[in-house]
Amino acid sequence: MVELSMPKQTFLVRLSKLFKFRAGYSKAFLWLNRPFNFFFALFFLLLSMPMFIVIGLIVKLQDGGPIFYKGVRLGKNKKPYMMYKFRSLVPDAETKVGAQLVSPKLKLETKFGKFLRDTRIDELPQLINVLKGEMDFIGPRPERPLIYEKICRHIKGYDRRFAVNPGLIGYSQLFTPHSTPKEIRAFIDNHFLDMSQNLIFEIGLMFYTMMIVLQKLATKTPKLIFRFVSGKSPQDDKRVSDRIEHEKTTVLIEGADNQGAIEGELVNINHEAFLFKTDKQIRMDNHLFELFTEYRTKATRRVKKKTAVCGGEIFREIKSAEKDGGYFYIIKYKPVSPLNFYMIHQYFLQESIVL
């Protein structure tokens, strides 16, 4: 079984020890919490007002729909409130999504919406919710009532989040991809709910988040400008942009030639399939695949190793034309558990805002 590994959680714990305090949401400093959130929300709202104007104009001009998305969310003690975001989906997306999670397969993102969601700046209008006292800067991310009733209410320990205000910045939201299973996110959020609150830590996390968002803006804005100038939509280059390449990643297939394991090199991967190369021909259709990758953390530059297990079937076999021979295989895959789903999206698809 793959162990749950969260290097970003380790970063936060190290930061806590550095300042000799612990972070979380026991509300030991409850009397400071409201003024802290109010004044910082007002400060960031005024600071980001030019961005509100620019983003609002782009969202409005692209399809004539509303600038903001307004949706009901569950707050503290499951009290419903109206949450605000910059609209990143097509105008009638709510009726198409229903009681399911937003997925790239639904193709509901607007041309500008993918940029907003990837950089997380679609969340900026929630500063208004913080001003109103419906949300805090730091806390578990709010949930839609339909998703809670269909999925989340059955997850062990999930309701613990309703003891505090939902957050504009969530631990699990910041350090896991959009598509991470709710069980994994609940596990991460509950870990920090067990710790005592400290406002210095929260200020540090707020500015750390701001730096990450600015970094994302710096890397993704040139791509957005290119799409605008070239007239391409995100769907036009979807097959290219969704394929993630790794420097050192291997695939291990158990019993693929009835003699033992076959090892191959992962060429690229997307949400539905991966391409790998191996010296041997695979003789069976359905297999269990283990994916291994190595990467360096931004903070320490240390090499980390991650593993994910998935079932899969051969979609296509291609005989290599190179002198060394070998075979290329396109595999349609499915992670064997929520944890392995998280590992695929976090470390192989690299979808978290913080990698």
Image: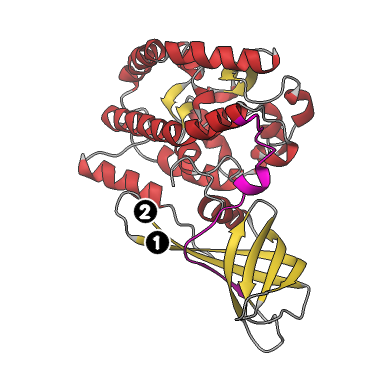
Residue 35 is left or right of residue 340, and the answer is left
| Image quadrant assignment for residue 209 | top left
| Image quadrant assignment for residue 105 | top right
Precedes in sequence: disc 2 or disc 1: 2
Q: Residues within 10 Å of mark 1 (few under 14, many from 20)?
A: few
SS at badge 2: loop
- 243 inside magenta stretch: yes
Picture layout, residue 108 above or below residue 257? above
Relative image position of residue 192 (x, y in whole percent): 41, 40
Three-letter residue code for mark 2 = Thr
Q: Nearer the viewer, residue 14 or 269?
A: 269
Q: Residues within 10 Å of mark 2 (few under 14, many from 20)?
A: few
- 217 inside magenta stretch: no
Q: Which residues are magenta?
A: 230-252
Give the Cα distance between marks 2 and 1: 7 Å
Picture layout, residue 50 above or below residue 244? above
Three-letter residue code for mark 1 = Lys
| Image quadrant assignment for residue 265 | bottom right
- The number of discs equals 2
Relative image position of residue 151 (x, y in whole percent): 69, 40
Residue 166 in view here = no
Determine contact: label 2, label 1, CB under 8 Å.
Answer: yes
Q: Residue at x 51, y 30 (%)?
A: 120
Residue position marked by numbered label 2 in the rendering: 297
Relative image position of residue 261 (x, y in whole percent): 62, 82
Residue 148 in view here = yes
Residue position marked by numbered label 1 in the rendering: 304
Relative image position of residue 142 (x, y in whole percent): 56, 28
